[in-house]
Amino acid sequence: MRDLEPRRQTDVLDARPDVVSVLVGVNDMGWHTLAPEGHVICVEEFAAGYDRLLAPLAEAGTELILIEPFLLPVHGVVEAGAARVSPEERKQWRAGLDPKIQAVRELARSYNAQLLSADSMFTDLATTTGPEYWAEDGVHPTPAGHAALAAAWLRLVT
């Protein structure tokens, strides 16, 4: 959310969209574990920033589709750019992400937005294939992960 907020006017609001889908939150949970200068974003700050994005869209009558951020329980140490992310760090990420998922759910209710429960969806899908099939690093979807998100989005809106 922190990266989107400075751009929300030009990238989103100025376009006067009829429909907006929002999938944010993963970058707001773990960068502080990878970089010493990383900023910890508490759930209140996350929710307030998300609300600042949604409020003018809702006021303009934009249809809102909120997609939960997700983290798949991949195995072992994963490379994320130059960083190596351990299972312990992913546990910290999960602890920070769960409250943000709840915040997204609450915002969806308060804005009468459609909600794509991506975290639950990927957790369910991973039981039969393993999580790496959907997102090798637990965060960035593979082509199969993108296809699953797209199919779920289409089911939601049609």
Image (spheres, helix red, strand yellow):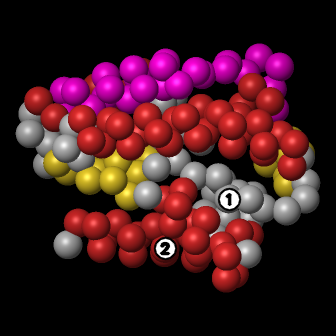
Q: Residue 72 bears which disc, if any?
A: 1
Residue 79: percent from left, percent from top: 85, 52
Tell me if residue 70 comes above or below residue 39 in the rendering: below
Q: Earlier in the sequence, mark 2 or mark 1?
A: 1
Residue at horizontal 47 percent and vertical 39 percent from the top: 102
Residue at horizontal 35 percent and vertical 37 percent from the top: 106
Nearest the viewer among 96 and 143 is: 96
Residue at horizontal 74 percent and vertical 65 percent from the top: 136
The overriding secondary structure of the stretch rendered in magenta is helix
Residue 25: percent from left, percent from top: 53, 38
Mark 2–mark 1 Cα distance, whole angstroms, equals 14 Å
Q: Which residues are magenta?
A: 34-57
Q: Would residue 74 be visible to someone looking at this image? A: yes
Residue under label 2:
148
Amino acid type, callout 2: Ala
Residue 128: percent from left, percent from top: 67, 82
Image quarter of residue 16: top left
- In the rendered structure, the answer to whether residue 71 lies left or right of residue 67 reads right
Circle 1 packing at 10 Å, graded few (<14), some (14-19), many (20+), is many
Can you name the residue that lies furthest to the bottom here? 128
Was residue 74 drawn as part of the magenta stretch in this picture? no
Tell me if residue 19 comes above or below residue 6 in the rendering: below
Q: Would residue 64 be visible to someone looking at this image? A: no
Residue 105: percent from left, percent from top: 38, 43
